[in-house]
Image (spheres, rainbow, N blue to C red):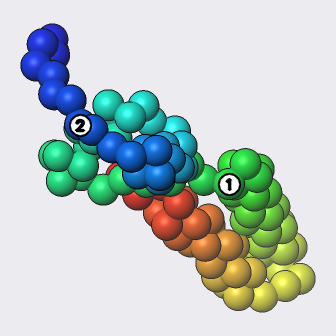
């Protein structure tokens, strides 16, 4: 899409600083930020730096639990359904973390 229309907004230094602070939290340009506001879309802040590492770690824990449950069930040594339940719970927590930090 070619954007040929523009407009000028006059602001004080404080207003511009406040705008820039909000824009920085989203990782967007000022222009993209304003266009997003105008279209009524939800603005999302950039997740914390360690967010992706935490999600990977939680998912890895869930995967490990699943593998242990599979082996325990095969050997008949552990309550595999309870283990599977916990593995699914960890995966659900990771999904909720993603939904909260990165709404679509």
Report the front residue among 72 and 9.
9
> Which comes before the other along the chain, label 2 or label 1?
2
* Drawn side of residue 34 relative to residue 20, left or right: left
The location of residue 56, given as percent across then percent down, is: 73, 52
* Drawn side of residue 57 relative to residue 2, left or right: right
* Drawn side of residue 32 relative to residue 91, left or right: left
Mark 2 or mark 1, which is nearer to you? 2
Report the front residue among 94 and 77.
94
**Mark 1 highlights which residue?**
48
Up-down: is 86 above or below 17? Answer: below
**Mark 2 highlights which residue?**
9
- Could you say whether the residue bearing mark 1 is in a helix, strand or loop? loop
Q: In which quarter of the image is residue 48?
A: bottom right
The location of residue 26, given as percent across then percent down, is: 48, 46
Mark 1 burial class by Cα count in 10 Å: few <14, some 14-19, many 20+: few
Up-down: is 91 above or below 39? Answer: below
Q: Which residue is drawn at 58% across and 66% down?
A: 97
Quarter of the figure with the N terminus: top left
* Drawn side of residue 10 relative to residue 26, left or right: left
Up-down: is 86 above or below 48? Answer: below
Report the front residue among 23 and 67.
23
Q: Which residue is drawn at 42% across and 31% down?
A: 29
Q: Is residue 72 visible?
A: yes
Report the front residue among 29 and 59.
29
Q: Residue at x 41, y 51 (%)?
A: 15
């Amino acid at each position: 899409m070619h954007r040929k229309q523009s407009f000028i907004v006059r602001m004080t230094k404080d207003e511009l600083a406040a705008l820039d602070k909000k824009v920085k939290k989203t990782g967007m340009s000022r222009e993209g930020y304003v266009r997003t506001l105008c279209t009524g879309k939800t603005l999302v802040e950039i997740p914390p730096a360690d967010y992706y590492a935490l999600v990977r770690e939680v998912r890895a824990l869930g995967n490990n639990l699943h593998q242990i449950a599979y082996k325990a069930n095969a050997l008949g040594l552990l309550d595999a359904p309870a283990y599977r339940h916990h593995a699914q719970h960890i995966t659900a927590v990771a999904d909720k973390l993603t939904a909260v930090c990165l709404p679509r």
